[in-house]
Image (tube, rainbow, N blue to C red):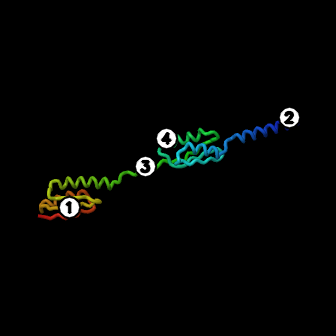
Amino acid sequence: MKIIKISVVALLALSIAFTSCKPKDADVQSAIQQKQTSDITVSVTEGVVTLTGTVADEVAKSKAEEVAKSEKGVKSVINNLILPPPPPPPSPLVETIDAMASAVKDAVKDHPTVSASVTDGVITLTGSIKKDKLPKLMMTLSSLKPRKIDNKLTVN
């Protein structure tokens, strides 16, 4: 009977000792947060670490997880870190307008008295041109599919 009581007391003492030695979630959270960048939020519940926030790349995401896993008292890590979205692709309209401006420049090069500009897909023609040359120029410019051709040419 005495051995049973001593065993129960010893078992109780050991369980209290092991429980009190275990790091507290708040301490684990603080230790991990100090090792992370300010863009990462750390939360700890019963030894399970959750990482949230935005990181620059996959390497930074993996490194943050490794840092969290290496802390004493961590049972597991839930890595909810995200990467920033990629930059949007260049606008096809901008590329089209730039290509159009180049094509318009080529179209009017044979007409030294004609000036042309492209703004928001609208071709504006100024200067003068001979009557027989105008239809060919207009067809060439129309084939570029501008929003509009603003013809301010003086026809000779």
Q: Are marks 4 and 1 in contact (CB under 8 Å)?
A: no
Residue at (36, 52) in percent of width and height: 90
Residue at the spot of label 3: 86
Q: Is tag 4's residue or tag 1's residue first in the polypeptide sequence?
A: 4
Residue at (60, 48) in percent of width and height: 43
Q: Is tag 2's residue or tag 4's residue first in the polypeptide sequence?
A: 2
At numbered mark 3, what does the secondary structure look like: helix, strand or loop? loop
139 left or right of 35 in image: left
Residue at the spot of label 2: 3
Image coordinates for residue 98, horizontal then vertical, percent = 28, 53
Residue at the spot of label 1: 125
Which quarter shows the C terminus?
bottom left
At numbered mark 4, what does the secondary structure look like: helix, strand or loop? helix
Amino acid type, callout 3 = Pro
Whole-Å distance between the Cαs marked 3 and 2? 69 Å
4 left or right of 67 in image: right
Image coordinates for residue 124, horizontal then vertical, percent = 23, 61
User: Considering depth in this image, is 100 or 12 the residue closer to the camera?
Assistant: 12
Which quarter shows the N terminus?
top right
154 left or right of 25 in image: left
